[in-house]
Amino acid sequence: MATLEAEALRKSFGGIEAVRGVSFAVQPGEMLALIGPNGAGKSTCFNMLNGQLRPDAGRVRLAGRDITGLAPRQVWRLGVGRTFQVTATFGSMTVLENVQMALLSHHRRLGGLWTPVRRMDRAPAEALLARLGMAEQAGRPCGILAYGDLKRVELAVALANDPRLLLMDEPTAGMAPPERAALMALTASLARERNIAVLFTEHDMDVVFSHASRVLVLDRGTLIAEGAPAEVRANPRVRQVYLGSGAMQGGY
Amino acid sequence: METLVLQALSGLASASSLFLVASGLTVIFGVSRIVNFAHGSFYMLGAYLAWTLVTSLPRGHLGFWGGVIGAALGVGLVGLVVEVLLLRRIYRAPELFQLLATFGVVLIVQDLALLAWGAQDLLGPRAPGLRGSTGILGMRFPDYELFLIVVGPVVLGLLLLLFHRTRWGTLVRAATADREMAAALGVNQRLLFTSVFVLGSLLAGLGGALQVPRESVNLHMDLSIIVQAFVVVVVGGLGSLTGAALAALLIGELHAFGILVLPKITLVLVFLVMAVVLVLRPHGLLGRPQDRAQPATGGAEPVIGPAPRPLLRLGAAALLAAVVLPPFAGDYALSVLTEIAILILFAASLHLIMGPGGMASFGHAAYFGMGAYGAALAAKWLAAPMELGLAVAPLAAGLFGLVFGWFCVRLSGVYSAMLTLAFAQITWSVAFQWVELTGGDNGILGVWPAAWATPKLVYYYLTLTLCIGATLLLRRVIHAPFGYALRAQRDSALRAEAIGIDAFRTRWLAFALAAVMAGLAGGLFAYAKGSVFPTFLDIPRSVDALLMVLLGGVQTLSGPIIGAIAYTGLQEQLVRLTDLWRLLLGGVIVALVLFFPQGLAGAARARWETRHGDA
């Protein structure tokens, strides 16, 4: 069964139809890229999947279960990890504490008033950070971390609840090219290892074509192409959207 | 019918006066995001200056109107000085620090006014040409009130013209809508902020000056007007001029008619209105959501860790002194020490919601007072012994914390803080006006400790144990997952939600926990004093708590403790040393804000960290 199914999603803001009936599915262990020029509706789509936006119409199903309209925190409880386009971490906590928070929340231990956090879920948090190559940064506050490292922290946090689905909104934005490839390779190997379905949006076509197992192309709120990277790259409509009259359509 | 019309007219006159003050406040906030507590002081200064000018200038139109205008300009000048010397340096500081600084100005102005004009109420002359009254529906209505009714709309019209027809006004509106963008477009912020502040102060001064023929000029004008002006500004929506006008109208009229219908409700009415408006419209009548409030400290909050060794040693030494020395202290010193222990807990409870919680409360005294009244009412009506009273206190406060908190923690920033103030004022007026139950202004007497705890020393030890125990418990909570969850939602609401943290619930429970602890402090305070009074939950007490927390430093866990000791000690000493303690305290506060923007404990830690490398 598909991990995630989006069915005829629609969303308008005022008179603007940002997403007009988008349907797709993500399979376990798959790296699915959602691409499209600026304003194509990628982020809107994304935010409807984990409950940050409520779709006007359509359904979202997670492993067959209807999750449309659930709050993000409920969606997370069902096993969906999320990273943001602009990283969101807890700046007053160390890298380790950030991961511990996600673990504690996963184990429903956040109501605790007595035992100090530094004694809780420490080992698994350290293990997770080690897997992401962040062990050395564990004690540093997130408030002073370099951007690329923050992206890794986010990934560690998103992995803390043993997700079956990872939603990554522009996971490599703001990173240097070598860092990008490393992070995506890491993500891909984690996805395979843990059989996680990964859906990500991305602007960097190198990243998309070298790491995605399948690609969806969105333009002005509708899916215009879907398939293996090579197919999509060869698709004339995609070429037109991205290259053809790019200036007029706001692409690049 | 006639009465109603006259009442409506007098409501319009007060609305007009209220608008003059509130308009300045809202314009200043809109551009500089400064919550200017000193605005009421400018209003008072306007009244005093006008009184001096009008009584010393030759009588007649020129003398009177010249005096009023002169006073307004003079206050504008004072505003200029305050802006350039103080506020300009702290625009980047957290909102609450600016509040603290302006509160320092309030204290300074109070004593300066006392020095210059004395403590007695001053009565000014009436306005020439407007001394009479006009017949309306067969009743007499003072001409001066009619004049005031006209002034409000005229000023509103002029301000709107200024903001919509001049280049300067356009810049002001641009900065109000998006300060960063205005700065990025090359607007000279310094000049803009200064000029806006001067304009706002001038309006406050004008509002005060125009009150001279209407009421006596006294030293209480500042705080009484500032609270009302805040209410108007918040109800109208921060930064919205038309909103302020609308809100002033609403509150002026409600006040006028409230007196007719239910004289007792007048004290609470404005706050009820504010509470209702904020619950229904979280950004006021015409306000827009604020751009994401900057984190309480401007930058990233520091990480919290176990206390460094020297701090632990210092704390242990202080505690040891607090245990060993009191048997040698006199009764007076014991009372002071007992009070300090209570205030430490009070400050620590507020710190929980302000520091880790990232919320501001202007009405924390409500829960302190609720604890005190809970204990006192149990003693008075149920003849409850002290032990039971001390159990009732935190429970009663916690219960109200749950109810009020449910509304307050939904809002953000200044709106949330103002709603806490509204609830505190509502409880205050209930304590003040429900004489049958609470004894009103006379309070409840005879709230004595149990026989075993009557000796001052024993009661001190009891207080010390409970307060320090509760404070350490709060510390523990901050280090525990719940405290981390609280900080998590403060640091990043987006991330907190994305990992399953219910931010609302976390804030709500923290608010209630803070209320419980404040209630315990209040209960202990009641038995220490042997009586309770409405002043236990009035605004000055809430301000005390705020000052203690900010003085110590919001970001450090030891901040509230140090703040409580420093503030109480300072006040105690200053009151004993000099009559001008407000002037000195205000000066100290201003100096602290300028030179120790992280509070005392924060400054100490910064020194420690620079000396010992990374924390």
Image (cartoon, coloured by chain):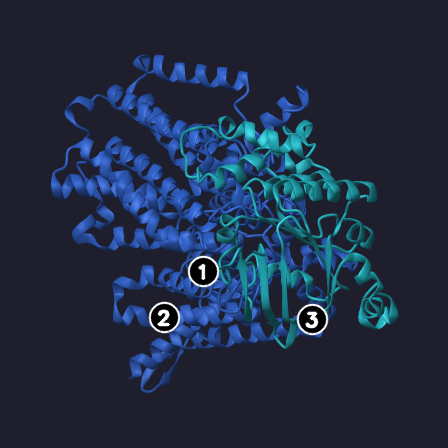
Chain colours: A cyan, B blue
Neighbor class of circle 2 (other Cα within 10 Å; few <14, some 14-19, many 20+) is some
| Rendering quarter of residue B450 | top left
Looking at the image, residue B209 sits to the left or right of residue A33; the answer is left
Q: Which kind of residue does numbered mark 2 sit on?
A: Leu
Q: Spatial distance from mark 3 to mark 2, Cα to Cα?
A: 54 Å
Q: Name the outermost residue toward the front.
A: A1
Q: Spatial distance from mark 1 to mark 2, Cα to Cα?
A: 13 Å
**Which type of secondary structure does the marked residue at label 1 adopt?**
helix
Which of pointers 1 and 2 lies earlier in the amino acid sequence? 1
Residues at circles 3 and 1 in contact by the CB criterion of under 8 Å: no
Q: Residue at x 63, y 43 (%)?
A: B298
Looking at the image, residue A243 sits to the left or right of residue B180; the answer is right
State the residue position of label 1: B231
Looking at the image, residue B30 sits to the left or right of residue B148; the answer is right
Tell which tag, 3 or 1, sits nearer the viewer. Answer: 3
The chain identifier of the residue carrying mark 2 reads B
